[in-house]
Image (cartoon, helix red, strand yellow):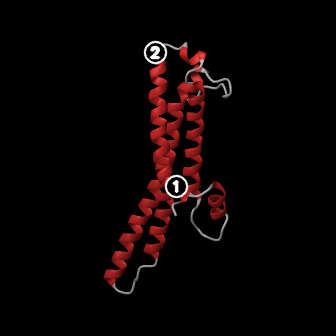
Amino acid sequence: MKLIDMTVTDFASEVDSNSPAPGGGSVSALASDIGVGLARMMAHLSFGKKKFEALDDKTKEEFKVRFDKLGEIRTELSTLVDKDTESFNEFMKALKLPKETDEEKVARAKAMEEATIFSIEVPYKTAKLSLETWRYANVYTYHQINPFKIHIRIFS
């Protein structure tokens, strides 16, 4: 079963187990995914409201474009929840490769290098997407449309 398809309780229990994965990368991707969902929730709560409708058409279109982009980011983050654990498993698999002959040692070293790069790329992409989220969500805080949000402007 994919991690992203687990219930919240089951995912949390899997993290709180003797299994080395899922770990911090998967948890971070999920936390970012949920954070993006919160930004989109604010937009959902703003669309159609008087303050939103009072904005000029260009600003409303910018909101919608950013809303859609945040949806794309959420989709990407959802895949990274499982990708991070996959990258860890690839590294562990590479560690178990035989290393008796010179050819085996070369193959093992290559597999470990590739798995290490994969293991670095996934959390890096999570961090990059998380930062990108702030840039797209900035317009929501700037216009202060939704009364339930924190009124700050980030990356102004």
Total numbered badges shown on the rendered structure: 2
Name the amino acid, label 2.
Asp
| Identity of the residue furthest to the bottom in this view | 100
Indicate the position of residue 149 as horizontal and vertical percent values: 66, 28
Q: Is residue 79 left or right of residue 51?
A: left
* Residue hosting label 1: 81
Residue 57, label in figure: 2
Q: Quadrant of residue 61?
A: top left
Name the amino acid, label 1.
Val
Q: Is residue 102 above or below residue 67?
A: below
Image point (35%, 81%), residue name: 104
Indicate the position of residue 58 as horizontal and vertical percent values: 44, 17
Q: Is residue 156 visible?
A: no
Along the polypeptide, which appears first: circle 1 or circle 2? 2
Q: Is residue 147 left or right of residue 93?
A: right
Q: Quadrant of residue 146?
A: top right
Image point (42%, 60%), residue name: 118
Image quarter hosting the C terminus: top right
